[in-house]
């Protein structure tokens, strides 16, 4: 039986959630606390909704979780873009995280598309 670990979308989402957590730990401050906290939740939601959707198998519930993962991936990218606008340090690191978030969003979109039958 195939597991979620074989899905490229999940692999990128897992890489993203780990990178986001590490970034937020290294750059935590009160002024950015709300954005960083929401960013962490959105990245985690992407990862875990892919897992849950895959575990449910084919069908409407699976597609719904993949759709939620897609929306969370878009939210992750938007929060990272906001951080890039709010901060002046680590622009390169944020650019890399935005690129990873956009790749994750694309792969999650493809996963959702394929789940439609």
Image: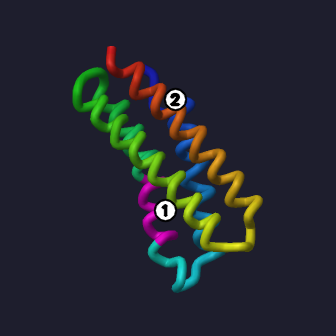
- The residue under label 1 is 39
Q: Position of residue 10 (x, y in %)?
A: 51, 37
Residue 40: in magenta span: yes
Which residue appears at 56% of the width and 30% of the height? Answer: 8
Residue closer to the observer: 83 or 112: 83
In the image, is residue 9 above or below residue 41? above
- 21 in magenta: no
Hey, which quadrant is residue 2 in on the image? Answer: top left
Residue lying at 53% horizontally and 77% vertically, measured from the top left: 32
Q: Is residue 54 left or right of residue 39?
A: left
Magenta residues: mostly which secondary structure?
Answer: helix
The residue stretch that appears in magenta = 35-44
Query: Looking at the picture, how far across and down is residue 91, in whole percent?
Result: 73, 64
Q: Residues within 10 Å of mark 1 (few under 14, many from 20)?
A: many
Is 3 rendered above or below residue 114?
below
Q: Residue at x 63, y 51 (%)?
A: 98
Q: How is the image coloured?
A: rainbow
Relative to 14, is 51 on the left or the right? left
Q: Are marks 2 and 1 in contact (CB under 8 Å)?
A: no
Q: Residue 28 placed where, x, y %?
A: 58, 78
Distance from disc 2 to disc 1, alpha carbons, whole Å, reads 22 Å
Sequence-wise, the earlier of marks 2 and 1 is 2
Mark 1 secondary-structure assignment: helix
Q: Which residue is mark 2?
A: 7
Q: Residue furthest bottom?
A: 30
Pick the quarter of the image with the N terminus.
top left
Query: In the visual, does 116 lie left or right of 47?
Result: left
Q: Residue furthest left?
A: 60
> Residue, x 57% and y 38% (percent of image)?
11
Q: Nearer the viewer, mark 2 or mark 1?
A: 1
């Amino acid at each position: 039986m195939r597991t979620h670990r074989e899905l490229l979308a999940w692999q990128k989402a897992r890489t993203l959630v780990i990178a986001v957590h590490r970034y937020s730990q290294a750059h935590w401050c009160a002024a950015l606390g709300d954005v960083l906290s929401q960013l962490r939740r959105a990245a985690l939601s992407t990862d875990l909704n892919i897992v849950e959707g895959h575990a449910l198998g084919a069908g409407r519930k699976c597609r719904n979780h993949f759709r939620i993962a897609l929306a969370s991936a878009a939210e992750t990218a938007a929060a990272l873009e906001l951080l890039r606008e709010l901060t002046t340090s680590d622009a390169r690191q944020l650019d890399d995280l935005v690129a990873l978030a956009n790749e994750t969003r694309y792969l999650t979109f493809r996963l959702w598309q394929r789940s439609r039958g």
